[in-house]
Image (cartoon, rainbow, N blue to C red):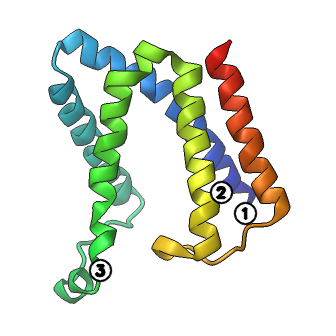
């Protein structure tokens, strides 16, 4: 379990760094959408190579593909929107406000998703402590953004 928390921690760190790296690529190429395609292709190649190295890559069967809920195919679109936000907003508003908004929006949204058990998550009702944590996240991002 601790390994998973460590993986999430590393992902959070790379998320902060990735915003600047992706925005710099976009600025250097002068073409944000070309940069987005490069980023997506590099991500796909990384997943393919790591999957092959770990022996965990296999194509799904047609019946597996048909069993996927319609909304579950939207992850790629959401990933593209995240990349576009990095390319257009991160360098303009700064790393701390960008990541603060990104993480806070994610935490508040995740509280709602958990409460209702939406998009495949187990249901975890909102408690006073979870609500308080969400409010503190919003207060924190306001402070980071304003000062």
Q: Distance between the Cα atoms at labels 3 and 1?
A: 27 Å
Q: Position of residue 105 (x, y in %)?
A: 56, 44
Query: Percent position (x, y) of residue 122?
Result: 61, 77
Residue at point 59%, 21% (across, down): 96
Residue 141 falls in which quadrant of the image? top right
Q: Is residue 145 above or below residue 139?
A: above
Q: Residues within 10 Å of mark 3 (few under 14, many from 20)?
A: few
Disc 1 marks which residue?
Answer: 1
Kindly report which numbered mark, 3 or 1, lies closer to the viewer in this rendering. 3
- Answer whether residue 126 is visible to the viewer in this image: yes
For this view, does 75 lie left or right of residue 106? Answer: left
List the single residue furthest toward the right.
129
Q: Is residue 72 above or below residue 39?
A: below
The residue tagged 2 is: 4
Res. 22 in view: no
Residue 131: x and y, percent? 76, 56
- Disc 2 is placed on an element classified as helix
State yes or no: discs 2 and 3 in contact (Cβ < 8 Å): no
As helix, strand or loop, the secondary structure at mark 3 comes to: loop
Mark 3 highlights which residue? 68
Instruction: Choose mark 2 or mark 3, whichever is in front.
Output: 3
Q: How far apart are the alpha carbons under marks 2 and 3? A: 25 Å
For residue 38, which quarter of the picture?
top left
Residue at horizontal 17 percent and vertical 12 percent from the top:
30
Q: Do the residues labelled 2 and 1 touch (CB within 8 Å)?
A: yes
Disc 1 element: loop
């Amino acid at each position: 379990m601790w390994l998973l928390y460590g993986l999430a921690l590393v992902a959070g760190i790379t998320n902060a760094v990735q915003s600047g790296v992706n925005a710099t690529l976009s600025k250097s190429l002068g073409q944000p959408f070309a940069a987005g395609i490069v980023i997506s292709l590099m991500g796909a190649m990384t997943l393919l190579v790591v999957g092959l190295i770990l022996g965990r890559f296999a194509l799904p069967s047609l019946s597996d593909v048909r069993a996927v809920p319609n909304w579950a195919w939207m992850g790629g679109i959401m990933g593209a929107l995240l990349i576009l936000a990095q390319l257009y907003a991160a360098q303009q508003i700064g790393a701390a406000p960008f990541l603060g908004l990104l993480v806070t929006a994610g935490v508040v949204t995740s509280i709602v998703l958990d409460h209702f058990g939406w998009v495949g998550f187990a249901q975890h009702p909102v408690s006073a402590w979870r609500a308080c944590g969400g409010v503190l996240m919003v207060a924190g991002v306001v402070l980071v953004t304003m000062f």
